[in-house]
Image (tube, grey):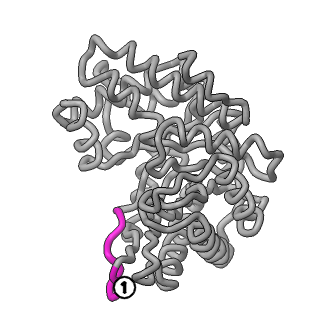
Amino acid sequence: MSERLEDIAAAMVANGKGLLAADESSGTIKKRFDVIGVESTADSRRDYREMMFRASDAMTKYISGVILYDETIHQKAADGTPLADIIKASGAIPGIKVDAGAKPLARFPGDTITEGLDGLRERLADYYKLGARFAKWRAVIDIDVAKGVPSATSIGSNAHALARYAALCQEAGIVPIVEPEVLMDGAHDIDTCYEISKATLTKLYTELYAARVVLEGTILKPNMVLAGKKSRKVSSPDEVAERTIKLFRETVPAAIGGIAFLSGGQSDEQATANLNAINAIGPHPWKLTFSYGRALQAAPQKAWSGKAANVAAAQAAFAHRAHMNHLAALGQWQPSLEQAA
C-alpha cells in the first residue's frame, strides 16, 4: 500500500467502503456489554472485536478501515495474531483514536474541550510502528441555546486543538480524521444545528489552514444536520440531505480527502437512510461515506451476546449492516432491502 497521505485518505473513502468505529473506551464498551449480559474483560473485548475483524465477507467488501482503541491495537487474537494484522489481511487499514476525551472547559459551564495533545508526537510514532495509518480526534460541541452553549471560545479552542492534532499526525505519516461533532442530544431545531455546525466548520478550516495541514491528506468526520433528539422532531432523510450538503458547500473545501459521517445516536436504519439520501442527490465534490460505531455494531453485538456458538450469526448481522451502508454510500439503498434480510 502506498504511504502517501493522499493515497491513504483516498483508500479510506474508496467507492462504497466506509470505516468501522471500534474505538469505544473501556467504560463505553462495558455499558454496551451490560446490555447483552456479558462481563467486560480484556478477553471478552478481544473476542468480540476479533469476531468482527474476521467477518471476511463484510471486511473485504465494505470496510476500508477500522478505528481502534489503545488496548485493541496492542491486543493479539486468540491464535496469537495481532488484531491489526487481521485487519490488514482483509485489505482494511488499521487506525487509532488518540484523544483523551472531552473535559469541562474552565469558566465556560456546559462547554467541553478535548484533551490529549501532551505527548501525542511520541504516541503517534508508537502507533505508526503498530500499523496505524490514520488517527481520530473527536471534539464535542453541545447545543443548549438557553445557556449560550456552545460559546465561541469553545468552538475556537476545539478547532485549534483539532488543527494541532492534524499537523502532528501528518508529521508522523498518519492521516488525521478530524471529528468536530455537534451533538444531536439537545432540544434544538434543525436550523440551530445548521448554524452551529456552520460556525464550527468555518473555524475548523481556518485553523487547519493556519496549521499548514495538507487538506488532501485529511478526512472529515462530521455530524449530519438534523434536529436535536429532545425537540421530538425527526427530520426526513431528504431534509437532512439537503441541509447537510448546503452546509458543506458553504464550509468544506473540495480539496479534502473525503467525508465519513458519524452516526451520532441515530438508529441503525436512520443512519443508513440519511447517508443514502445525501449520496442520492449527488454528484458532490467529495466522497461521502460512513464511519459508524453503534450503527454498525448494535445488531452483531446482540446476536453475539458473548457466546462462541453465536459468532457466525453475529458476523452475518455485521455483514448485513455493512452491506446496507455500502449501498447508502453509493446512493443505492432502499428500505425494502432491510426487510428482505
Answer whether residue 302 is visible to the viewer in this image: yes
Q: Does any portion of residue 168 appear in the rendered image?
A: no
Give coordinates of residue 1: x percent, y percent.
Answer: 65, 35
Q: Which residues are magenta?
A: 101-109
Image point (29%, 31%), residue name: 46
Q: Residue at x 40, y 57 (%)?
A: 123
Q: Quadrant of residue 277?
A: top right
In this figure, which residue is indicated by the disc labeled 1? Answer: 108
Amino acid at circle 1: Phe
Residue 153 pos. (x, y %): 48, 85
- Going by the picture, which residue comes out furthest to the bottom? 107
Q: Secondary structure at mark 1?
A: loop
Task: Identify which residue is drawn at 57% across, 32% down.
Answer: 63
Q: Residue at x 66, y 35 (%)?
A: 328
Within 10 Å of disc 1 (Cα), the crowding (few <14, some 14-19, many 20+) is: some
Residue 202 located left or right of residue 74: right
Against 222, residue 104 (above or below) is below
Tell me the chief SS of the magenta region.
loop
30 left or right, relative to 334:
left
Q: Is residue 108 magenta?
A: yes
Apparent side of residue 131 relative to residue 176 in the rendered image (left or right): left
Residue 89 location in percent, x, y?
52, 24
| Residue 71 located within the stretch drawn in magenta | no
Q: Residue furthest front?
A: 232
